[in-house]
Image (cartoon, helix red, strand yellow):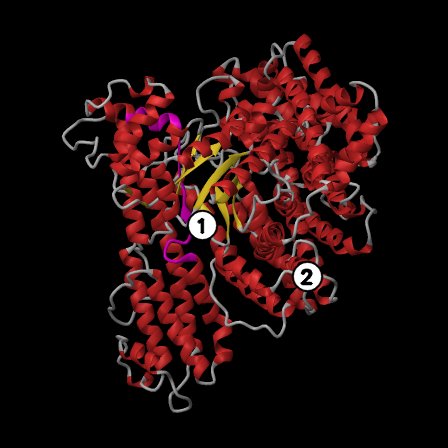
Amino acid sequence: MVNSAAAQESDSGADKDAPLKEDIRLLGRLLGDVLRDQEGEDMFDVVETIRQTAVRFRREADPKAGEELTALLHKLTREQTITVVRAFSYFSHLANIAEDQHHIRRRRAHLMAGSAPQQGSVSFALSRLKQAGVERDTVQAFLRDALIAPVLTAHPTEVQRKSILDAEHDIARLLAERDMPLTPKERQTNAHLLRARVATLWQTRMLRYSKLTVADEIDNALSYYRITFLRELPALYDDIEDEIDAHYPGAAIAPEHYSYVQMGSWIGGDRDGNPNVNAGTMQHALTRHATTILDFYLDEVHALGAQLSISTLMVNASPALQALADASPDASPHRSDEPYRRALICVYARLASTARALGATNILRKEVGHADPYPDAASFGADLQVLADSLTANHGALLVKPRLAALLRAADIFGFHLASLDMRQTSDVHERVLDELFASAAAEPHYAGLSEPRKVELLLAELAQPRLLYSPYTDYSEETNSELTILRAAKDIRQRYGVRAIRNYIISHTETVSDLLEVLLLQKETGLLRTASGELEVMVVPLFETIPDLQRAAAIMGEWMALPLVRELIAKQGQLQEVMLGYSDSNKDGGFLTSNWELYKAETRLVELFAHSGVKLRLFHGRGGTVGRGGGPSYEAILAQPKGTVNGQIRLTEQGEIIASKFSNAEIGRRNLELLVAATLEASLMPHAAEGGHAERLAGFEAVMADLSERAYKAYRALVYETPGFTDYFFSATPIAEIAELNLGSRPASRKASKRIEDLRAIPWGFSWGQCRLLLPGWLGFGSAISAWLDDGPGRDDKVATLRAMFAEWPFFATLLSNMDMVLAKTDLAIASRYAELVPDVELRERIFKRISAEHGSTLRCLELITGAQERLAGNPLLARSIQNRFAYLDPLNHLQVELIHRHRALAQEPSKIDERVHRGIHLSINGVAAGLRNTG
């Protein structure tokens, strides 16, 4: 890791990977230099010996090296242990930076060589569409009506500190600089700066000593807007416009500004299981959103003022532009002939007033004079359009593109709200609030105890009443007051920041129609729903999470959309209704195979229902980072959706450290945004295979999948929920208890204070299995299902042929297996067996681990039987090499984590002996393993 051998350990791969090896060699050497300087030669030698031994153990399968590694780690002092953990953790971080830079380098090489468009690019998508006969006006209509919305969320496994992200961002920038032509002196300066930033990283605390607050999470998320979204999203729109012109030449249409990619957020509005989110955090979130976007607008307007030095002595300006200039508070005679500058001074002054009105307290550049604030973002955009129109009409069209066009686009996309904040709460809370409101108003003494038909009847009757249940003269519980205050705050936020500031209310654990009607009634109580005019300000969005919920989803939505009041509200929403599907809880509930199948079936049924009802369906995918939580490549995931489920409308969550891996680098961030647009274009507009033979074959595949799902479900439940002692095994053989102690996020790791797997949040559940290198939620049940199906009755060869046809012809099944393949590539039973040794009950340890090992072996054999690939990730050699190269640096972290957990739990028996250094070492190792595996949250 810390000398030139680091990059020479892998001689596989094409020459095109040579720059990646060179970058890893450089960063490894710099980290080694810093380690020598900071910790001394002896400590450097310890780390290097461990690294070399781990490499031998991993790549040469040398059992003697394994014994040596165990002995080396066991004899480390506590101080040495922390240094070793930090060294290997930081190498994982630096390797990630090098890989990201290499992805950018390879993409640029493709573009410079004039290669055919790469899959996942908008150019590739448009090529496919044109070949399929899709016309330009169809693409334009799609963009006009589409909504593609990544939604950033904070979750309890997010391990990155902003200070670390900032240092790594600088390292990435300096590494990219080395690809440019540099003089020897410039290269020397670059190396010096790189070493300084690596030294800063080494001297920066990797962990938080205090628990993250919601305000911290909001600020962390906003850093990705400054790094990526504010500039790259408008630039992506321009690129897409250019690509459309290139693929459909001679059919130029005046560009229209469609905001088809918009940002969303849950941070500050997601109350489900998080007592720290309230009306105050919602207000704070929007204030910070507005401050961030208005700071950006102010900087850009100021820069435009410097650029647009156009004089009316040289060229004319439009009357509208002259009027805007005349309204400026700038009276300087030096700018009397420069109307663009005076107009921009006017715009700047109005923006500054707007920023103060929306909560900004620190505007860096004071405006020349006072001007009234803008009433809304559209008015700001209109002023910018006046400048653009005047330039275009007076020989200045070339001056629009660089900055003004991007600012105009940003105003359309971000408004003054930056991102739409979703509200989310669990249905149980709504029921308790209404139970109290009904009882206090003497309308129904025991609402919560009513049957479902009676609840629906009562809720509809109350929605038809002009009066409110709430009285300002009644004392309510803290929970009821808090929930009503939040909804009132939402109304105020929409009035202040624009209607896009809050548009959706997500209901967790939606199990009945009454769960949806309850939120309608709460909106009526707080002025967000006016039943007389049929106006609903915030869309009610059900979240179906567990396997039974997914199975009931279409029936519930059918009942919901059949209600006359709801039909009226949906019509006012543009005949559109959103439905959210949860990947995490369905996986924890029923396992990987069944979760994916039930999601597929739920989507198919919803498409049929919505088509029959004449309502447009927008699906909101609650995907996580791990494959077990719906993770995996977004492009493939969208293309694998059942026919009719995308249709130009898709929202999906971006969670935990996945946000950092996708959006902490501007170019990588733009590529990830482009992937979403390209996949949505293809999934929505590409003609589907004709009915008849294809439909019949698909039905056959689906019948097989239904059988496999039932078998996988039984196998998964048998181990996780029905095996005596499995919960104890999980809490002992993974770092779940230590993860719960980490100051990772503002949300608790469990919904309730219990050790039941049912109560554990799906996110730390998956994260824990990743840390111990089993990644069990991404594959458990598959091997049992396939084996049992093949062995059940005659025709085994025909069944194998069917499975291979499913893999070759059905994107859903192919993506399922591809994601599982990636998970299995990161799985390591030898490492997992070390964690199993943490289980004090020997009989329990051996019994459970034996079953897990058998299922793992069966899963590998079945995957190889279907795909024909003996090696993991045979179809993605670059990723395979990346993962393989990481293992030698991950292994010591896992071994050390086991050793530290063992020490920590032994000391925990006597609280007076607990050593904070051991505790800190565990947390550092968790960070390092998460960085090494990347999609773990």
* Residue 419 magenta: yes
> Dot 2: what SS?
helix
Q: Is residue 33 visible?
A: yes
* Left or right, residue 372 beside residue 801: left
* Residue 132 magenta: no
Q: Is residue 605 above or below residue 373?
A: above
Q: State the extent of the magenta-drawn residues as a range.
A: 414-434
Residue on which disc 1 sits:
222
Q: Is residue 689 above or below residue 274?
A: below
- What is the tally of numbered marks visible in this picture? 2
In percent of width and height, residue 350 lies at 29, 66
Tell me, for residue 127, which label it has, or none. 2
In percent of width and height, residue 560 lies at 41, 34
Seen as rendered, the residue at the extreme front is 692
Q: Disc 1 versus disc 2: distance between alpha carbons? A: 35 Å
In percent of width and height, residue 839 lies at 63, 15
* Left or right, residue 907 beside residue 512: right
